[in-house]
Image (spheres, rainbow, N blue to C red):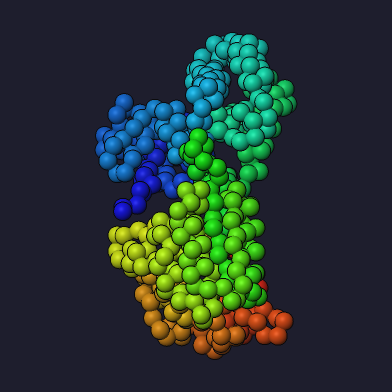
Amino acid sequence: MPRAQPPSLELTYFDAGGRAEPIRLILAYGGIDFDDVRIPGKEFPEKKPSLDLPFGQVPTLKVNGTKVFAQSVAIARYAATLAGLYPQDPLEALEADLVVDTVVEATMTFVNAALLEPDEAKKADKLADANNKILPRLLGGLEKRVVGPYFLGEAPTFADIYVLDFHTQIWSAFPDQLLATPDKYPKLAAIADHLRQSSELASYLNPKKRNRGPHSNHRGKVNRFKQLHSHDRQRPALGMIMVGDRQDSRLYVEAKGRACAEVGIRAENRFFAQSTTQAEILRQVHAFNADPTIDGILIQMPLPASIDEKTVVDAVLPTKDVDGLHPYNVGELAMRRRTPYFTACTPEGIVEMLDQEAVPIAGRVAVVLGRSDLVGNPVGMLLRKRHATIENLVRQADIVVSACGVPQFVRGEWLKPGCVVIDVGINFVGNDMVGDVCFNEALGIASAITPVPGGASIYFI
């Protein structure tokens, strides 16, 4: 069964905020990847003939590399649908559209008066009219419609994003020309403050101060899922199965439960004694497979020797195999131009961490220590997909990923000066948790290294 792919999006506008900025904010909030094409104003006349502009203007949105759409609010509404920020209820959608149209009218009222009117006398008259009549009427009407932290209550919509944009591009940018200031509209100002402080927008609004949280984009994706399925089901759910009481497995399951709660996913945990039979575990797997309210299944590894891991893994539906261990998902990951339903979170977290730290991957030599199905093999496949060369000699490596499960196995003298080391190992020496790498030895040689505990492990849930 082919997997539905998210659309590829290319947003084209000037190298400025303007009409495209609410669209960028909406996509950023939803954690949706897009190409942000920004054309310097001086270059636009020269480039305009080569651009696909349905109505001769920007912004435009190219979807899946083919069809191009114009009109900023129409694009924003489509982006909000993808991001889970457009209401499903028709009346709530009408309310959100009303707010957006009103904010756009307020924005253009100020822009036409303060920025586009060349005659100084007319400009003064238009600004006076805007400040004394039009903006108080529009913004005052919006202030009365706020019913909670956001316009529609507890959850934001694209209408709230437009208020944030008005606060940023108008209120904050032109304080000396506005009498209708944010202190007169505290509910609107509070909406902007809430969104500025949200983890979903932290990276976009503060590009120089990255949000270090590994789940920063996931809340938006979960919210989008919940809105898309609000009429037919409850929130997304993960079914977890653990057999026995290994200390390291227990730590992972507890961390996964906390991560689920953090982003709004329901965790259904099933714990079994060490003596549980394979047939009992398979019955639970089949029950999760058949349950339409369970979206993903995770088998905590390792299983006891009495249970055949292959049989249990193969029993999980590929569409619910969140660890990416089913042969279908492994095969899709191994092949070029293929996409598995899921890839294990640890390899995904490793690549995400490299990206967040702006570590180049393409053309670099990467060494992966360990060949487990859950970490070593898939992380090698992911790095190959990003055009890294996978080698077996540690001394040559620009990137070292250690997942061999041997305490302090990798010595500092093995490492290439300036390399990046990601230590995935979680090992116990007595009561102490240590990694695969001799941290103190590597510290003076590697340009960056993840410590154990902490470090990389927060990305692997």
Residue 75 shows in this picture: yes
Residue 417 shows in this picture: no
**403 or 50, which lies in front?**
403
The location of residue 349, given as percent across then percent down, is: 51, 64
**54 or 429, which lies in front?**
429
The location of residue 224, given as percent across then percent down, is: 51, 41
**Residue in the image at 67% along x and 19% along y:** 144
Q: Indicate the quadrant where residue 201 lies.
A: top right
Q: Indicate the quadrant where residue 426 lies.
A: bottom right
**Residue in the image at 55% along x and 29% along y:** 159
**130 or 75, which lies in front?**
75
The location of residue 454, given as percent across then percent down, is: 65, 69
**217 or 71, which lies in front?**
217
**Residue in the image at 60% along x and 85% along y:** 407
The location of residue 281, given as percent across then percent down, is: 51, 67
Q: Give the vertical position of 84 relative to 450 (above or below).
A: above
Q: Give the vertical position of 393 relative to 335 (above or below).
A: below
Where is the C terminus found, in terms of image quarters? bottom right
Query: Could you tell whether 213 is left or right of 358 in the image?
Result: right
Q: Give the vertical position of 51 relative to 320 (above or below).
A: above
Q: Indicate the quadrant where residue 190 lies.
A: top right
Q: Count the marks: how many?
A: 0
**Residue in the image at 51% along x and 14% along y:** 119
Q: Give the vertical position of 142 relative to 395 (above or below).
A: above
Query: Could you tell whether 338 is left or right of 29 in the image?
Result: left
